[in-house]
Amino acid sequence: MSCGEIERLFLAGAPAEDVRRHAKGCSTCRALSADVEAAEQMSAGLATPPLPSSLRTRLIAIPRATVSCEGAERLLPLAIEKELDADDERRLASHLTRCEACSEAAAVLFESRELVEPIAPPWLASRLTAGRPRRERRFWSWILDPKAAIGLAYAAAVVVMLLGFNPADLARRVRTGEIGQNTRAAVTVAESSLSDRLGALQEKAARTLAVWKGRAGGYGRAAVSNVVSLIWKSSATKDRSGARPRNRDGRGALRERETSISNWRA
Amino acid sequence: MSAEEKSLVDRCRQGEDDAWRELVDRFGQKVYSVAYHFTLNREDAEELSQEIFLKTFENLHRYDGSFPLVAWLLSVSRNLCIDRYRRKKREKSFRFVSDDAVLPLLKSDDDPASETLKKERTKLLFWALAEIPEDLAEILVLRDLDGLAYDEIGKALGLPDGTVKSRLFRARAEVARRIRERHEKRGAAGAFQSLALAAGGVL
């Protein structure tokens, strides 16, 4: 096979006319072409071996003898629960002897039921309890908390009062006409409640102020009289020496115009 | 064609006995023929056919209808066929082909003289097939003995059509060369005449 045309003519499937024309002048390709035709003819006249009827019967019975991989998927869970009837059990067993993938899957599933339960270490319970994740409270969940809402409402009321606004007046300025009837009723109740509270607060404040005013006047008068008496005393004792006469033993002696207790009694 | 075959396969998957029977009747003969050509033995061919259909049944969910069902059947069972073929080659069953092995391949309307000639020729063919590489022998069996189309062979073996054609040509040339060499070794009166005799006087 040394002709350079073999590749083009025979392997690449050139038209038969080209092959014949080339073969006339090329002894190599003529011999090769004859060989190929001869080999083709050798098998051309052979008959097809007939399908034995017993084999046909066996082939038709295959679905009753085994299951597909899909069928095995459906039957395996039932087999694990021992809920298969005898026929299905036989079909599944037949498939598992032939299919490595399904057999491995079945082995894993069956063995998983025979595993021993691992014993928990003694420290596990305490660690699990300690490591329980805390629920993170989001801002809105915190705001919507009923206690927080009540606290915020009170804080807002205090701020409004400190700013010098009358909450009841503010409530009146709100466009209550656009609010539903129930809301208006609620506002009215709130108004009256706030007015009452505000009145009580004002009265208490006035009382406290009066008390402090009185106290301040009293303290002021006392302070003025003390100051005056101190000034008067200091001017009256200006010319006297402050030293008291001493006895022989060094203790203080009575002044001239002073009398002892015994003298006074006498 | 493939859509209709896909429908047939789907019915088989749903467990319809009639659909499976139809599939066996449509492809059983072809599969048995391929199995016989790879084994040259009735019992082995029956066993191989059963294996092929079992494997087909178990893998029906894999068929998507993208190519002919017969090609898919062969692609699913190709390894089974090749394994049997190698085993037979190791056992030298093809080197010493018996008369009984080739009898099912001969047409019954032949006269005794031509039947004897065909028998010898067929034995020679299988001897030569066992001598050439497997990838070439496999294509020659599927094309010349089983009559599969190029595209069916290509799909079954995962090869483009051009490769199938070139391999088929090389397979035929190799078979012819082996037969010529055999005759030359035996001192026959000319290799070409021997081949012509083996081919039934067509040249």
Image: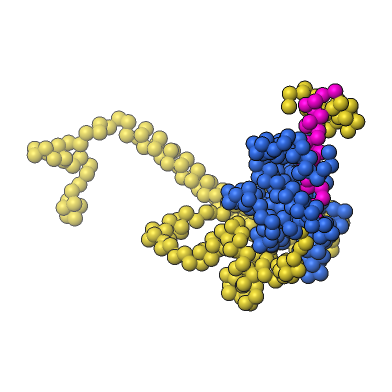
Instruction: State the residue in front, B57 or B123.
Output: B123
Q: Quadrant of the C terminus of chain B?
A: top right
Specify the chain shown as blue: B
Give residue B65's position: percent from left, percent from top. 81, 52
Q: Is residue A57 above or below residue B10?
A: below
Give residue B30's position: percent from left, percent from top. 78, 56
Q: How is the image coloured?
A: by chain
From this viewpoint, is residue B86 visible? no
Q: Residue at x 38, y 61 (%)?
A: A122
- Chief SS of the magenta region: helix
Q: Is residue B16 above or below residue B176?
A: below
B170 sits left or right of A96 in the view: right
From this viewpoint, is residue A14 visible? yes
Give residue B134's position: percent from left, percent from top. 66, 42
Magenta-drawn segment: A25-47
Specify the chain shown as yellow: A
Q: Residue at x 18, y 42 (%)?
A: A254
Q: Residue at x 60, y 68 (%)?
A: A93
